[in-house]
């Protein structure tokens, strides 16, 4: 029997992937909100005032609660014709665009800096949270048609038509973000991982796993939010992601039936995916009922009870509900915030 157990242990050691072996060291989080920022087309800044309703929630009785425990900063294009992932414009970004994006997030008074300060202020009222809040940074897709991206750490010019150079560009960005995050010496947040901005595997299938390996060696998670049935969604583990959240893509088009939410929940269970909740500024102009539908479906299908959740909220949809004085907006705001703070997975 001892020999059999030893043999089984050796077999297990051989077949487990690098991602699985390092997973125990990865930071965990349960409610991750998406905060878009970094493009010139954005008209808002993630300062302390705008960040506050994402950090804490005050209920109708005046009791304050911690809100989201993870914050994903990401951008899809520069706002000046260049894209951070395929499908948005016809021009790829380069190393300077990536560097500017990272610098935009890692500031003292906005983005992660504002988050750090907002948490510090909340600690004076709520006490120290059980763990530090987590930060996830969007990792641009290295686009194949960029032959003049920039240089690797050793000064070598990178041609992103080559897989090795695409991976090297990702490594450069990861290293740069880690270095800048450490230099900022934030008190209340931890860099937990990176997010793959490409929402399908079509153009990056040959490089994703190696990027994930590199992140896991640094004890950082690799996150993904594929759209509904996008290429590769069902093989997210084999691709090399640690956490993957499925987009139902229900909110945005009223012709998409409620059954889409049930279908998405079934797929999430079948393929062990977590889930994304989706809404945008239209919650105040007749689409609020569709956010209620997400909360209903996630609870009825058991996803609220068992899944990590990510929250797409356009640019400032939750903030807009927070500052609104309309009763229907306030009712939706309180219902949604309770959905987050009472999330059983915590």
Image: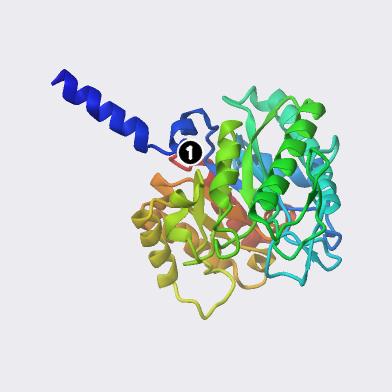
Quarter of the figure that contains the N terminus = top left
Q: Which residue is mark 1?
A: 19
Q: Position of residue 158 (x, y in %)?
A: 77, 51
- For this orientation, the residue located farthest to the top is 2
Image position, residue 18 (x, y; %): 47, 36
> Residue at the location (57% across, 51% down)?
208
Q: Is residue 8 above or below residue 208?
A: above
Disc 1, SS? helix
Viewer-nearest residue: 279 or 203: 203
Q: Nearer the viewer, residue 59 or 257?
A: 257
Q: Quadrant of residue 181?
A: top right
On screen, residue 340 above or below 119:
below
Q: Residues within 10 Å of mark 1 (few under 14, many from 20)?
A: many
Q: Can you give x and y, in whole percent of width and height, for residue 116 in the image? A: 75, 32
12 on left or right of 172:
left
Instruction: State the colouring used for the structure image.
Output: rainbow
153 sits to left or right of 259: right
Task: Decide if residue 273 is on the left or right side of residue 191.
Answer: left
């Amino acid at each position: 029997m001892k020999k059999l157990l030893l043999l089984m242990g050796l077999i297990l050691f051989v077949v487990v992937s690098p991602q699985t072996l390092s997973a125990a060291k990865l930071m965990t989080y349960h409610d991750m909100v998406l905060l878009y920022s970094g493009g010139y087309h954005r008209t808002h800044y993630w300062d302390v005032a705008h960040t506050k309703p994402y950090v804490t929630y005050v209920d109708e009785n005046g009791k304050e609660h911690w809100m989201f425990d993870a914050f994903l900063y990401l951008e899809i294009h520069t706002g000046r014709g260049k894209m951070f992932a395929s499908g948005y414009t016809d021009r790829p970004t380069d190393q300077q665009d990536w560097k500017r994006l990272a610098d935009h997030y890692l500031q003292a008074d906005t983005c992660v800096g504002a988050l750090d300060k907002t948490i510090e202020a909340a600690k004076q009222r709520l006490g120290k949270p059980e763990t530090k809040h987590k930060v996830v940074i969007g990792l641009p897709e290295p686009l194949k048609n960029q032959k003049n991206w920039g240089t690797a750490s050793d000064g070598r010019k990178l041609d992103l038509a080559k897989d090795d150079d695409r991976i090297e560009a990702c490594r450069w960005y990861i290293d740069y973000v880690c270095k800048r995050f450490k230099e900022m010496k934030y008190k209340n947040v931890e860099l937990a991982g990176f997010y793959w901005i490409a929402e399908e595997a079509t153009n990056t299938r040959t490089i994703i796993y190696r990027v994930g390996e590199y992140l896991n060696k640094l004890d950082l998670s690799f996150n993904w939010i594929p759209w509904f049935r996008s290429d590769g969604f069902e093989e997210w583990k084999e691709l090399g992601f640690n956490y993957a959240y499925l987009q139902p893509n229900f909110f945005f088009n009223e012709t998409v039936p409620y059954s889409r939410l049930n279908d998405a929940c079934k797929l999430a269970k079948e393929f062990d995916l977590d889930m994304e909740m989706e809404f945008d500024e239209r919650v105040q102009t007749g689409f609020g009922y569709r956010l209620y539908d997400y909360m209903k479906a996630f609870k009825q299908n058991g996803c609220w009870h068992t899944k990590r959740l990510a929250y797409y909220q356009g640019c400032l949809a939750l903030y807009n509900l927070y500052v609104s004085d309309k009763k229907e907006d306030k009712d939706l705001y309180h219902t949604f915030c309770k959905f987050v703070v009472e999330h059983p997975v915590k």
